[in-house]
Every structure is written in structure tokens, then in C-alpha cells.
Amino acid sequence: MQRDELLALMISVSAPAPRLDEWDRVLSIYAGYLEGVAPKLSEKELGNFIGAGAMFYRTLCQADAYRQESVWGRRKKEG
């Protein structure tokens, strides 16, 4: 499967959406799947998947911080 096909599937496939404050659960699920295939991967391939997970984690952290600041920052200004 090509990269574009994989990306399209990731975007379009139906998947349960965790609550916004449980985003770390998604990364835990990813780590569990990676654990299953890790023995079949080279050290470099595994490092690439871990790096992608790290980028995903940082993106989620930034989004969560922005969301919290939007909600709590607004409440502080209103209060």
C-alpha cells in the first residue's frame, strides 16, 4: 500500500474517538500495536515508528494545552 492510500485510510476509517482529556489513550493503543510488530522491525524501522509516536504525542500535548488555555483562560478573564 502506498503512503497516500495509508493516509487516506487513517483519515477516513471509522474509529472510536476518546474524550478530549483522554488523548493519551490513543498513544497507548499505538504503543500496544507497535509492541506486537516490533520484533519484525529493524532497529531503524522501530526508531522511525517511535519517532512518529513522539511527534504525535507532542502535537497532542500542544493541542491540549491550547484547548485548556482557550477554556480556562477565557474563564479567568470572565471571572
Image (cartoon, rainbow, N blue to C red):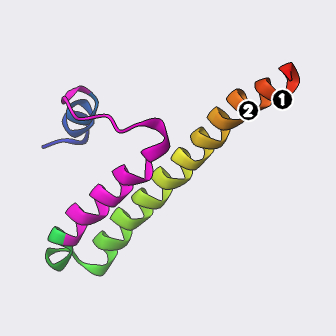
Q: Please check the rendered image and state whether residue 24 is part of the magenta-colored stretch, yes or no.
A: yes
Check the image and report above or below for 19 versus 29. Answer: above
The answer to if 22 sits in the magenta stretch is yes
State whether residue 15 is above or below residue 1: above
Most foreground residue, 79 or 23: 79
Report the magenta residues as a range.
12-35
Q: Amino acid at mark 2?
A: Trp
The amino acid beneath tag 1 is Lys
Instruction: Characterize the magenta stretch by its predominant secondary structure.
Output: helix
Give residue 47's mark.
Answer: none
Closer to us: 66 or 44: 66
Q: Is residue 44 left or right of residue 13?
A: right
- Residue appearing at x 41%, y 37% in the figure: 19
Residue that carries the numbered disc 2 in the rendered image:
72
Horizontal and vertical percent for residue 44? 33, 75
Q: Are marks 2 and 1 in contact (CB under 8 Å)?
A: yes
Seen in the picture, residue 54 relative to 13 is either above or below; the reply is: below
Q: Which residue is mark 1?
A: 76
Q: Quadrant of the N terminus?
A: top left
Q: Quadrant of residue 71?
A: top right
Residue drawn at x 24%, y 65% as measured from the top left: 32
Look at the image and tell me in which quarter the C terminus lies: top right
Viewer-proximal residue among 25 and 47: 25
Residue 69 falls in image quadrant = top right
Find residue 75 and report its image quarter: top right
Dot 2 falls on a residue whose secondary structure is: helix
